[in-house]
């Protein structure tokens, strides 16, 4: 009978649903001149190919070409980033063909001399601003964490440190427990200056990034760029553990990964020179390994997950697996290219499948949520009739 009860229940349900959500898949279409092959309605994307019937895809949210950086980043900052301070790894990936807007979405226009720079800032800059604010607002409550930034590039399956004039890093060895490469630069920032410091390091790294040439986009990057923000919390010994003479303190590191993947178009199709053919092969290999890792997880075969198939999947291992990771994939599409668009959306759809099988806990929760939702609906119905 009580309308407030229904509203409270609904709000609780929503909060629970969001808490158990581990994977988000967003789509973003870039602006094009001429004919667009897609139609977007909230979370639905319909692709019309020249031959064959239109295909519909459903995601968490789809943004059409009119969406601003603020809108796209707003979704990420509301849904995904708040988890970063709960001891979980966060990974935001931009996937799509060259020229589809991956770099625009992740970095945007970062030229500080441009008057529109702030308005055009992409996910990386805005996420860092938000994290700086979140960390600062916590200062005082808990021992301040140590916050460090790394920025690296995976090119032809080799790793390069973008904060150290593109110095090559040693390969990740499978014997290592940790997935952070040895010798990787970690720039430590002061919490009260974090935003400015991290922004300038992001610009520095982006300038160091390797760029190549393809038919689609002469400035396209043929590498995966990975920003890693390390947040190290020292867990001071509790009174109880001090009494029991347990080790004084330990640290726990959570990371925020922001990944601008290399173009997903098939190698060979647009390659201009042998060098580019090789780049394309490595890109295909790492993206399909990423897909296989996700596919293995989606089918629940976690123990055979082929992380080591590529440097990229090994590097992202913590972020794309396990119970303390949250992944947000932004599938960028170029609406003038129906075949590549459909292929990007099919790839992105695999990530949605991850969701329902991430853990029995999650699926248990969601069935509880469904039951409760039905109760709320019937309460609301009864209330409206009364
Ligand atoms: P990618 O990194 O996927 O190869 P880019 O991000 O470099 O693609 O985008 C290709 C071009 O399209 C760039 O000139 C970029 O500024 C422009 N662009 C991409 N997405 C948008 C958008 N949503 N709004 C305006 N321009 C965009
Ligand atoms: Mg790019």
Image (spheres, grey):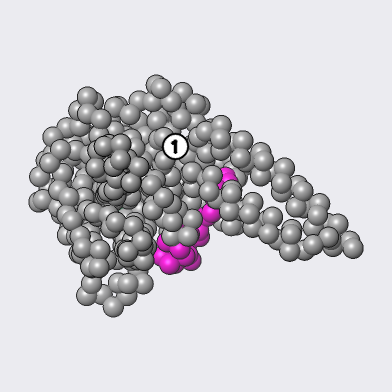
Q: Residue at x 40, y 30 (%)?
A: 293
What is the quadrant of the C terminus in the image?
bottom right
Q: Is residue 89 above or below residue 141?
A: above
Which of 320/285 is in front? 320
Badge 1 element: loop
Residue 155, percent across and down? 21, 40
119 left or right of 160 in image: right
Q: Is residue 61 magenta?
A: yes
Q: Is residue 24 visible?
A: yes
As rendered, which of 145 and 335 lies closer to the eye?
A: 145
Identify the residue at horizontal 49%, vertical 55% (top origin).
Answer: 79
Q: Which residue is mark 1?
A: 323
User: Can you name the residue that lies furthest to the bottom here?
Assistant: 115
Q: Could you say where residue 150 lies in the image, as x and y percent from the top left?
A: 21, 50
The quarter holding residue 177 reads top left
Where residue 106 sits: x, y (%)?
A: 34, 56
């Amino acid at each position: 009978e009580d309308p407030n009860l229904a509203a409270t229940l609904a709000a609780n349900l929503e909060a629970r649903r969001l808490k158990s959500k581990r994977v988000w898949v967003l789509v973003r279409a870039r602006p094009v001149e001429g004919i667009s092959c897609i139609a977007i309605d909230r979370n639905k994307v319909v692709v019309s190919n020249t031959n064959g019937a239109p295909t519909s895809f459903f995601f968490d949210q789809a943004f059409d070409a009119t969406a601003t950086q603020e809108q796209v980043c707003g979704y990420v900052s509301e849904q995904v980033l708040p988890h970063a301070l709960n001891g979980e790894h966060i990974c935001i990936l931009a996937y799509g063909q060259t020229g589809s807007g991956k770099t625009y979405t992740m970095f945007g226009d970062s030229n500080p001399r441009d008057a529109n720079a702030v308005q055009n800032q992409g996910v990386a800059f805005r996420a860092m601003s938000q994290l700086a604010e979140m960390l600062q607002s916590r200062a005082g409550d808990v021992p301040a964490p140590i916050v460090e930034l790394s920025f690296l590039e995976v090119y032809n399956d080799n790793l390069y440190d973008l904060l150290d004039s593109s110095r090559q890093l040693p390969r990740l060895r499978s014997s290592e427990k940790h997935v952070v490469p040895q010798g990787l630069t970690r720039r430590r920032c002061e919490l009260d200056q974090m935003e400015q410091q991290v922004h300038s390091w992001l610009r520095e790294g982006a300038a160091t990034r390797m760029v190549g040439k393809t038919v689609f986009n002469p400035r396209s990057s043929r590498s995966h760029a990975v920003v890693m923000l390390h947040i190290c919390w020292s867990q001071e010994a509790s009174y109880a553990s001090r009494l029991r003479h347990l080790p004084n303190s330990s640290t726990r590191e959570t990371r925020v990964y922001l990944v601008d993947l290399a173009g997903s178009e098939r190698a060979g199709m647009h390659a201009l020179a042998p060098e580019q053919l090789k780049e394309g092969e490595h890109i295909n290999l790492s993206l399909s390994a990423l897909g296989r890792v996700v596919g293995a997880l989606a089918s629940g075969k976690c123990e055979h997950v082929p992380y080591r198939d590529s440097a990229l999947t090994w590097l992202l291992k913590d972020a794309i697996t396990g119970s303390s990771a949250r992944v947000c994939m932004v599938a960028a599409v170029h609406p003038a290219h129906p075949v590549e668009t459909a292929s990007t959306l099919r790839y992105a759809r695999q990530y949605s499948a991850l969701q329902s099988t991430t853990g029995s806990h999650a699926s248990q929760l969601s069935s509880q949520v469904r039951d409760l939702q039905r109760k709320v609906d019937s309460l609301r119905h009864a209330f409206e009739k009364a």
